[in-house]
Image: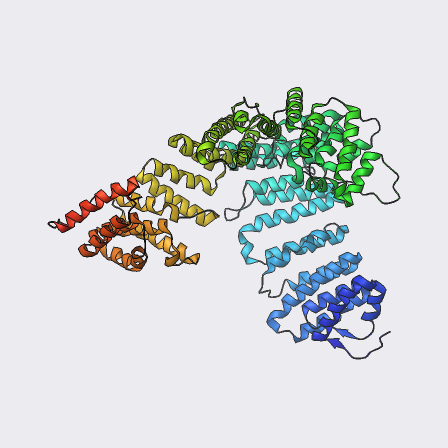
Amino acid sequence: MTQNSTVLSGIQLDQFMDRLEVEHQEHGADYLLGQLRAQPLKAASLESIGRLHALWVNVGDADAAKAVLADDGQALIEVTPEDARNELKLNLLISQLRLGNYLKDEQGLLQALDTLQQLTSEPLPFDIEHYRRDRIFDDLQHTTLDVALKAIEVRHTLALINPGRHALRAWDAADQHRRRARVLAAHERNEEAREAALAAIAALRTAGEDQDVDANDWLWLGDALIEILPLRLAMFEQPVVHLITDLSLPQRREWEVRLARLAARSLQAQGDLAGALKICEVAALSLESGGGDNFVEFHLPWLLENGQIEEAGQRAFMEIYEMRGHMWPGIAFWVHDRLLDAEEQSAWWPLCVMRACDDQAVLERFTSGLPWRDESTPSLGPLLDALDAARDDLEQIDNVFTEALAEARRRAPNHPWITRLVAVRERLAGRIDGNTELAMLREAITAGNMQDNRSAFSLISAHASVFGIADALRQPQLPLASGMYYYQFANALEDLVEAHLEGLSSEEAEPTWWLLREVQKVAYEQGQACMEQCFANGRGHRFDACAHQYSMLCNDLAINYRCYYNLYEQALELHHRGIAASSFAEHYQGILNNRIQLEDDPGIAEAAEQLWHYAADHGYSRFDPEEDLFAVTRALFRQDREREILIWLERILKWQEERGISDKELGYSPLFSRVKIILFLSYNLPEAAASLWQRYAPYFDESDEPSLLGCSGDALKSLGRKEEALDYYQRAILRSDPDNDLDQRNNEVFRQSIAGLQGSAKPAGKAWWQIWK
């Protein structure tokens, strides 16, 4: 009963709710209920309505929560400006839907949905897409059939009234029918579900030229409907095949993998499990550069259903081994299920748990997928009990590993993967020395025919700890099974070598760095061969099919070729292959770098333009156009394209301004580029050159760098400012290092320029110039 007749509203209500939200945690629902009923409350804003009705829900008073939305909501509508009322009404209806869903109030939900649909006939001058995407519409699809179908209808109506979705009308129609099909199938209205699924296909198939429909849309539709229409696989395949004909081979192969997944699911839905598993040779290829997106969520259960327990165990183990903290969470359910089987003797299942104990993050990911147990559940054995305890206490990781190791040894005491995992763990814990670890790894890798990057890295790391990193790099490297393995192995070596060479001088370390570059080069080349073979025939190792992985490998091999072997043409070819497979900005940067090394002036200009526009359109966090400004403007100058230098000058000055870099903060390299630009412009665009000189002259004048001073002299000489040029040349000579050969060679040029200026004048004109570095 209300004890205080004073209505609490506005700021006082907000403060009251602030206090209750804290006290609710301390005193519980009964206390909160008493406080809410102690006096009348009136929410006067949308935020306050949301908070107050949530408090009533938390104490279990559904009627009071509804009253807040209805009464306080209506009062707020009446005082809201007319042009904002409809958005307020829509927000209140969304809140009613959430409350109705929580209360499982079917009639209330249907009424709110009807009201919302009626509202769509009125002007809604706001971002309707924000509301169409609200999660409540997805949630309502999992309620009763009538509510689910009505929610789908209302969502589609919200799409239709949005003029910004004109090019997506076909997609929206397909989406409506797709959702209806899945809801009807879930309620076992199979014939109606098939009709809705066919209507979804027809919506995309009959889309006009003004509609935005691509291969991804067909795959999206097939992914949702293939189990409803397993005999209509061709309806999804044919449009995709037509739409991908112009893609590069690596990209087409990825699409073939996606279509193979649809085909496998189609066969499984028809009862042909053996046929589905056969297609998994392609369907289970990974399409993510880290090894994910690999169809394990279908493949693993199918293997178990088909009685291929050993294959399933190895598949589960490799998923955990490779993906670690990014593993499919459902893997834990199946591992748990097999460990519950008293007759199961495969060692792969306890090995899965051993690998899940790689660190606490991996174990946390694994335990998140375990079936829930309450306190009344009897013991399931030491291993499963230890896993359950670790769910709430990751410090139990060593105990879990110990139990998993004991179970694995009981099942297969000499299993190579037991030795492999134990060797690394025991060495990290300091319980064995490097020689012992190395011997164990050699034994395990040979016995288990291990060809993965982690095993190869563990072996070379152990060898380096015993015999040194240089000797380890000279050893014959393990043959690896996939391009991803070679790529990750080569990249991981960088940090290992750096750690071993710490404290050495650059001269002492250089031979080992060259050994590393050769090992990396060979690894990248072998990885490239693996992946290109997979692209050529459409089959290969699970980790050879990802186009982006191939693109990254091409990029790193191209960098190796350019930086260490001067193989510029080969590097360019790799960058072009990478762009065709999966473009990213580093390839465009690499093309520019190689064109600069080749002194290909037209190529430099073209590559710089491509990089600039790609970075603008797609982003490039490491993009610094200052680094290549001199080379690009020099290339334009050599081609008599000085007016394009002005375009680059405008870009670089805007780029500098956007980053808040003042002229005073510019270092030597940017200033050097600018003085060279002044020189390049001085011949045919002297006014632009003079203007640029005026801007930067104070910073050139303050410099102690002899090359910058000398280049300033060149620029002034070209502008016809003889006395100033002489001063800069003389200062450059004075600032030079007598022990620096380059400085002394430059001084000879400066003296010749001085002599020329002091002698008879020469006719002005475009002349060759000296690059001072």
> x and y percent of residue 407 in the render?
79, 29
Compared with 125, 366 (above or below) is: above
Q: Which residue ends up furthest to the bottom in the rendered image?
A: 6
Compared with 532, 752 (above or below) is: below
| Rendered residue at 58%/64% (across/down) | 126
| Rendered residue at 55%/28% (across/down) | 468
**Residue 69 seen in this snapshot:** no
> x and y percent of residue 613 in the render?
41, 47
Where on the picture, by quarter, is residue 120? bottom right
**The C terminus appears in which quarter of the rendering?**
top left
> x and y percent of residue 437 in the render?
66, 26
Foreground pick, 456 / 132: 456
**Residue 166 seen in this snapshot:** yes
> x and y percent of residue 553 in the render?
50, 33
Q: Which residue ends up furthest to the top in the rendered image?
A: 447
Q: Which residue ends up furthest to the left in the rendered image?
A: 760
Picture mark count? 0
Foreground pick, 430 / 602: 430
Direction from residue 123 to residue 713 in the image, left or right: left
